[in-house]
Amino acid sequence: MMHMSDSPLLIAGLGNPGAQYARNRHNAGFMAVDTIHESYDFGPWRAKHQGLIAEGKLARRKTYLLKPMTYMNDSGASVGAAARFLKLLPSAVVVMHDEIDLAAGKLKAKTGGGDAGHNGLRSISAALGPDYHRVRIGVGHPGTKDRVHGHVLQNFSKADEDWLVPMLTAIAEAAPHLAENDLIGFMSKAGLVLKPPVHKPKSAKDDTE
């Protein structure tokens, strides 16, 4: 098996390019990789692989951040091109995206699976197969299927900022765990950032509860 540090990591955040989409719910993935970019020592964004790519390190592993500029439905053209160029297996790719099947402010990480009607994931799965990692950023469901398109292309509201900003911070703080292929550690760290413990238990008894 390839040792994790032998292969770079590619973290792709999904969204639509252009100022009119910048604050859309559908652009939660762009926002997440932007926050990682600001939080660690990454080089400048450069145009490559039909997207914007930045190079740096997470947990001592060479890491690339990618924002496809293809529009959401063709995200696989950019992610596939970058993964092929970097000679990456799907296990070295993490895709961050908005998820309507999760309540607003909820975060989940998983490996593989279907695309649950997300056109960006469908495009990436067509390019890479389904076995990449996903960080799913809950944006809530508008209630009926015919309202989904309008919902994801609406801007986050002022009230949304109350959970969105801490969520993006938590994703960035937990990101080094992704470089260690540790999705459980990623979720634990993100959860701790979002809900810090009220007190530190001192006794061993508390630790086993």
Image (cartoon, rainbow, N blue to C red):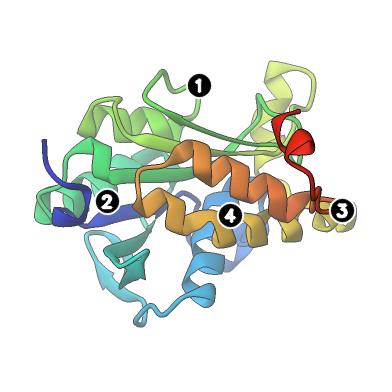
Between the C-alphas of marks 4 and 3, the distance is 23 Å
Task: Tell me where residue 107 sits by quadrant.
Answer: top right
The answer to whether residue 157 is seen in the rendering is no
The answer to whether residue 113 is seen in the rendering is yes
Q: Position of residue 87 (x, y in %)?
A: 9, 49
Q: Residue at 58% across / 52% down in the picture? A: 27
Q: Amino acid at mark 4?
A: Ile
Q: Position of residue 158 (x, y in %)?
A: 87, 58
Question: Residue 78: which numbered mark, if any?
Answer: 2
Circle 3: element type: loop
Q: Residue at 66% across / 52% down in the picture? A: 24
User: Which residue in the structure is indicated by mark 3?
Assistant: 199
Label located before the other in sequence (4 or 3): 4
Would residue 14 be found to the left or right of residue 62 on screen? Answer: right
Q: Amino acid at mark 3?
A: His
Question: Residue 117: which numbered mark, if any?
Answer: 1
Circle 1: element type: loop
Label located before the other in sequence (4 or 1): 1
Q: Amino acid at mark 2?
A: Ser
Q: Position of residue 172 (x, y in %)?
A: 56, 61
Label located before the other in sequence (2 or 1): 2
The one nearer the camera, 171 or 143, is 171
Would residue 152 be found to the left or right of residue 73 on screen? Answer: right
